Amino acid sequence: MALFAIFGTQEASSSFRHYLKEMTDEINSKSNDYILNVDEDEWKEYFVNKYDFTPLTLFPEQATVKFKGKRKIKKEQFGRVYESESYRFELSVPYTGYYFLFMLIPSTRRIHHPMVNVPSSDSGILTAEFEMYDQNEKQFEYDKKHLLDGIMANVPNINNDLQRFKADVSSTFDTVYKRKKEKVLSENSFFEKINIDIDKKTDKIFKVPIAKKKKIPEPIVDKKSTKKFTETPAMDDAFYADIIEVIYTFFKSVEKKPSTYKSKDEEGLRDYVLPTLETRYDNTSVTGETFNKGGKTDILIRYKDGTNLFVAECKYWKGEAVLHETINQLFDRYLTWRDSKVAIIFFVKNKEFSKVLATIKEIIPKHEYFVRENGSNGESSFSYIFHFPTDKEKFIYAEIMAFHFPE
């Protein structure tokens, strides 16, 4: 994470021209045989995907402020120098989108570039600091709003530039490819006219490369289940692991912000993570409070054909009985036979968080659907294998997660 002036580091037009030149050079570097034999539409789609950067979305309604501390400063008044204190605050704003866009200067812009910290990822928390020199509530609200406005002001502008760039990728490909192909055909025609043999046959198969996706690939058929009645799309291990990591990392961050979680119920806390999940995965929909089988699930990720891929429940921790009750509720009421990847997320108010984690690890193996432990994904994220309530040969992968939100 680096400190920089938001939307004020380098010209967006220059960066986007660089990408277009990179694409042009890649097209022109290919052999004549490649140009004549490659599928034009597939190659164009490759570049469209390669430069399909996710636009920025910020969530100012979820912004939080925390006190960072005080520092001594020197002031001068009427020729007299004296020492005073200042108050430092940190503003945090969740976001999704291609983080590099925060560094670019839009073609149309508002000239206000606060210094910010942004993680090098396509979702996370943007932070920025502001400082006050006296205890003035109205000044605090003004400074906070001014900083937030400065952060938000150029988001639509850079997204507009990005949209134009995406159109340029498509049109530039058409122009460059057409020009390159015409040149190749012209050369071939010339050689034929001067009786130089050209090998028109080739045993090569020209395949378009696959653009590296930032998002998890489409789900595949579950190969873990011992029983196969259907080739229904299911979540592969990489997809499941990524969802668990996103949820775990997200709520660990929320743990550090009491103002975010105080006075929030399960649904309120759940809603914080939905935007991140919604924008992260291709060919899926992410919803909260969705009917599935016999009730409403808190988080449901579905494949584009409507198949369930991931189901999760969010609860405040209220002891061993609620743990047992939540597992039964999820497995008996919400899961169908085809659901195979789930999670239960507990928000813990208890001061002694370690005792809660110990209770979870002690109680889970005693549940009637428990099969075995399956490792862990962090200090408070435990992996298990359960079986479906009416079918002991149908396994369910379940992550039990807990996060500390003391009052």
Image (spheres, grey):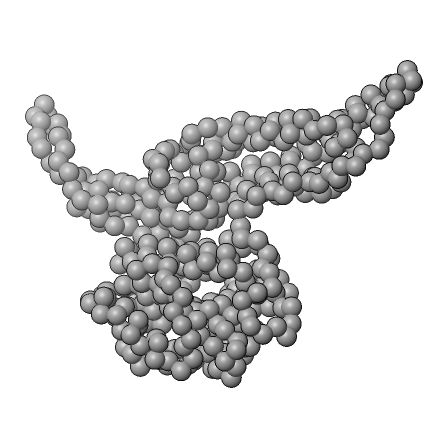
Asked if residue 267 can be seen in this view, the reply is: no
Query: Where does the image place residue 100, in percent across and percent down from the top left?
Result: 46, 37
Q: Is residue 123 above or below residue 84?
A: below
The residue sitting at 44% across, 71% down in the picture is: 385
Q: Is residue 370 above or below residue 276?
A: below
The residue sitting at 30% across, 72% down in the picture is: 360
Q: Nearer the viewer, residue 386 or 218?
A: 386
Residue lying furthest top: 194
Query: Where does the image place residue 240, in percent across and percent down from the top left?
Result: 48, 60
Q: Nearer the viewer, residue 212 or 93?
A: 212
Query: 46 left or right of 311?
Result: right
The residue sitting at 34% across, 69% down in the picture is: 346
The residue sitting at 60% across, 42% down in the picture is: 211
Asked if residue 363 can be seen in this view, the reply is: yes
Q: Is residue 125 above or below residue 232?
A: above
Query: 20 left or right of 397?
Result: right
Quadrant of the drawing holding the C terminus: bottom left
Query: 384 left or right of 166?
Result: left
Q: Nearer the viewer, residue 30 or 22?
A: 30
Q: In which quarter of the view is residue 209 placed?
A: top right
Query: Where does the image place residue 79, in percent across and percent down from the top left?
Result: 9, 23
Q: Is residue 265 above or below residue 56?
A: below
Query: Where does the image place residue 178, in percent across and percent down from the top left?
Result: 77, 30
Quadrant of the drawing holding the N terminus: top left
